C-alpha cells in the first residue's frame, strides 16, 4: 500500500488557491499514475445534506472543480455520484447537487452527474462484519474511485473523513437499515471500515480548508483548518486526520 499522505495549505476556497493545493497533492501522491488506464472514474464527494457550500457540511465545489480540471488530459468517463440518507430519487439528487454547488462544478468541468439509483451486492473483502455490501451501481462499476471527503467530527464515529465518507455508497434508506444492524458505535465503525476496504477508493482527498467540529456531521460549527489532505491509503490518511483534530487515532 502506498502510504504517503500529503498536506497542502489553502487559506480559503478561491479557485486559484484550491487548484494549486489539489495539483500539489496529486503530484505528491503520484495520483497521475493511476489515471492513465482508467476508463470510468467516479468521484464520491460528501453531500450528506442539502446545504450550500458556505455551511461547510459538504465537500466544497471548488475542490471538485480543481480535481476535474486535473482529469481533463485523461481519456476517461467521469461521473460524480452520491447517495444521501433518506428518500433517494432523481428529484432529490437534482436538488442536492444544485444546492451544494456540485451541479455547476460538474457541468463546467465536463463530468456527468449520477442519477442512477440502482445498486448491487459486492462481496466483502474481509468477511467479518458482512458477507457483502449493497453499493450504488455507479460506484461499484467504477475503474477508479476518487473519494473527496470533508473533515468533520461525528457524533457516532467521532471522525468523519476518508473512511466514513464511503458509507455514502450505501443507497438512501438502506443506510438506516445498516444503522439498525450495527447499533453499537464500535460495530458500526468496524462495518464502515470493512465497507471502505471493499470499495478501496484509490485516490482520497479530505477537504479540511474549512472543517466542522462539535455536533457533526451536519450540526456542528465551522472550524478553519486551511489544509487539504490526500493519500492513496485511506487508513493512513485518517490516522493523520485524527491527529490533526486532536483525536487519539
Image (cartoon, rainbow, N blue to C red):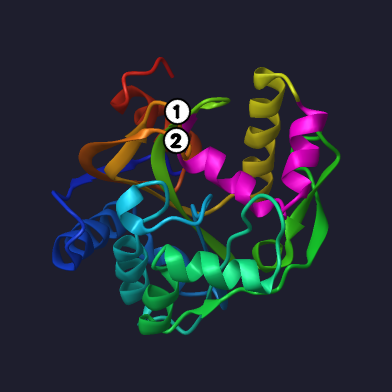
The one of 16 and 195 positioned closer to us in this rendering? 16
Q: Quadrant of residue 180?
A: top right
Image coordinates of residue 39 in percent, x first then y, are 57, 78
User: Dot 2 lies on which element?
Assistant: loop
What residue would you read off at disc 1? 215
Left or right: 62 as drawn, with respect to 181: left
Q: Is residue 30 visible?
A: no
What residue would you read off at disc 2? 219
Q: Which mark is residue 224?
A: none
User: Dot 1 lies on which element?
Assistant: loop
Q: Is residue 50 visible?
A: yes
In this rendering, the answer to whether 151 lies above or below 34 is above
Q: Is mark 2 in CB contact (under 8 Å) with mark 1? A: yes
Q: Quadrant of the C terminus?
A: top left
Left or right: 32 as drawn, with respect to 77: left
In this rendering, the answer to whether 11 lies above or below 42 is above
Image coordinates of residue 48 in percent, x first then y, are 53, 50
State which region is magenta. 159-182
Amino acid at each position: 500500500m502506498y502510504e504517503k499522505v500529503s498536506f497542502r495549505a489553502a487559506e480559503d476556497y478561491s479557485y486559484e488557491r484550491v487548484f494549486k493545493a489539489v495539483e500539489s497533492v496529486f503530484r505528491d501522491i503520484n495520483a497521475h499514475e493511476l489515471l492513465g488506464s482508467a476508463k470510468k472514474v467516479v468521484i464520491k464527494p460528501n453531500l450528506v445534506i442539502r446545504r450550500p457550500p458556505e455551511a461547510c457540511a459538504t465537500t466544497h465545489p471548488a475542490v471538485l472543480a480543481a480535481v476535474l480540471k486535473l482529469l481533463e488530459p485523461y481519456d476517461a468517463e467521469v461521473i460524480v455520484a452520491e447517495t444521501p440518507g433518506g428518500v433517494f430519487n432523481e428529484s432529490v439528487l437534482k436538488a442536492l447537487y444544485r444546492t451544494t454547488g456540485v451541479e455547476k462544478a460538474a457541468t463546467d468541468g465536463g463530468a456527468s452527474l449520477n442519477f442512477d439509483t440502482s445498486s448491487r451486492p459486492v462481496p466483502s473483502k474481509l468477511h467479518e462484519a458482512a458477507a457483502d455490501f449493497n453499493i450504488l451501481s455507479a460506484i461499484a462499476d467504477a475503474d477508479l474511485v476518487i473519494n473527496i471527503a470533508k473533515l468533520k467530527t461525528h457524533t457516532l464515529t467521532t471522525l468523519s473523513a476518508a473512511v466514513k465518507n464511503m458509507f455514502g455508497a450505501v443507497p438512501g434508506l438502506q443506510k438506516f437499515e445498516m444503522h439498525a444492524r450495527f447499533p453499537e458505535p464500535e460495530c458500526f465503525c468496524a462495518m464502515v471500515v470493512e465497507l471502505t476496504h471493499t470499495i478501496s477508493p484509490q485516490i482520497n482527498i479530505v477537504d479540511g480548508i474549512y472543517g466542522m467540529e462539535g455536533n457533526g456531521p451536519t450540526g456542528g460549527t465551522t472550524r478553519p483548518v486551511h489544509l487539504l489532505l490526500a493519500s492513496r491509503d485511506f487508513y493512513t490518511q485518517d490516522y493523520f486526520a485524527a491527529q490533526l483534530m486532536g483525536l487519539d487515532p
